[in-house]
Image (cartoon, rainbow, N blue to C red):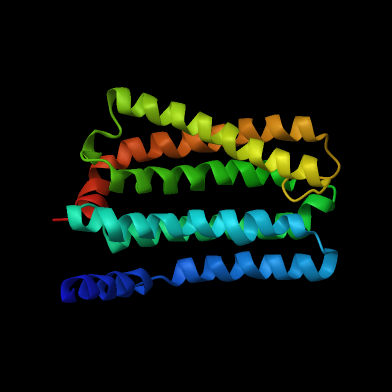
């Protein structure tokens, strides 16, 4: 019984350790909900910013504490880099949902290019904490699998955003002056370009990243 209590206290301590980027991201996400609700009363914003985004930005820390750390994979340096990347995701998306998508200029193209880079970075680093042999992640069939998963995630994520905007008649995730079908496909293309760019960058740096962050000696 005592050991279980000790483990809970230990996990709770690790959950809040070096968590500034996670806290910043949470603050922006929930402030976005409050600003949007009181200004426009668009309840649909609660779905992504109060539920979906907080879950995904917390997931890497849960994985690290409950799985990766006890298996000797990952580090707080790696976790901090993932959470900093996810903070950038929230930081760039929040003003888009609140203001930029309704202003009639193409912020969305820039946003999804950067999101492809940042999401890809965070996803690959998080995946490296889950698999048994992260050193093989950037070679052979594993690399091809990453490309396939990246494309599938693009369609799933953009499909969710498309569905929210279509069903609610809002522009939380699409530029007001652009046809939403065109916006969907442009988001896929720009996200793919950004994702491929970071994938090949990390492939070239993977040995150094392994030694410093994923499998530190």
Rendered location of residue 122, percent (x, y) = 43, 49
Is residue 185 visible to the viewer in this orientation of the structure? Answer: yes
- Whether 98 is drawn above or below 182: the answer is below
| Vertical arrangement, residue 213 with respect to residue 131, above or below | below
Relative horizontal placement of residue 106, taking residue 87 as reference (left or right): right
Residue 191 or 11: which is nearer the viewer?
11
Residue lying furthest left: 217
Left of 110 or right of it: where is 60? left
Q: Is residue 174 left or right of residue 215?
A: right
For residue 79, which quarter of the picture? Answer: bottom left
- Tell me what residue is drawn at x 63 percent, y 59 percent: 49
Residue 93 at least partly seen = no
Query: Residue 81 placed where, x, y %?
Result: 39, 58
Q: Quadrant of residue 169?
A: top right
All told, the count of numbered labels is 0
Work out which quarter of the rendered image holds the C terminus and state it.
bottom left
Horizontal and vertical percent position of residue 40: 84, 64
Above-or-below relation of 89 to 140: below
Towards the viewer: 73 or 85: 73
Residue 174: x, y in percent?
Answer: 75, 44
Q: Residue at x 63, y 68 (%)?
A: 30
Front-lying residue, 186 or 132: 132
Residue beneath the point at 55% across and 32% down: 192
Q: If the image is split into quadrants, where does the N terminus sit?
A: bottom left
* Residue at figure coordinates x 52%, y 29% from the top left: 151
């Amino acid at each position: 019984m005592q050991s279980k209590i000790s483990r809970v206290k230990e996990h709770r301590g690790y959950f809040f350790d070096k968590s500034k980027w996670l806290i910043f991201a949470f603050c922006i996400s929930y402030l976005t909900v409050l600003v949007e609700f009181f200004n426009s009363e668009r309840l649909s914003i609660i779905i992504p910013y109060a539920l979906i985004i907080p879950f995904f930005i917390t997931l890497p820390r849960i994985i690290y504490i409950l799985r990766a750390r006890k298996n000797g994979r990952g580090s707080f340096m790696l976790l901090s880099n993932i959470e900093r990347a996810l903070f950038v995701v929230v930081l760039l998306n929040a003003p888009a949902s609140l203001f930029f998508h309704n202003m009639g200029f193409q912020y969305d193209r820039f946003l999804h290019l950067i999101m492809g880079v940042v999401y890809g970075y965070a996803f690959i680093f998080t995946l490296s904490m889950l698999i048994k042999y992260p050193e093989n992640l950037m070679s052979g069939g594993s690399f091809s699998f990453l490309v396939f998963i990246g494309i599938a995630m693009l369609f799933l994520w953009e499909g969710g955003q498309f569905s929210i905007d279509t069903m609610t008649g809002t522009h939380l995730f699409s530029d007001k002056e652009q046809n939403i079908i065109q916006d969907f496909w442009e988001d896929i293309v720009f996200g793919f370009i950004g994702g491929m760019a970071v994938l090949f960058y990390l492939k070239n740096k993977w040995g150094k990243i392994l030694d410093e962050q994923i499998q530190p000696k």
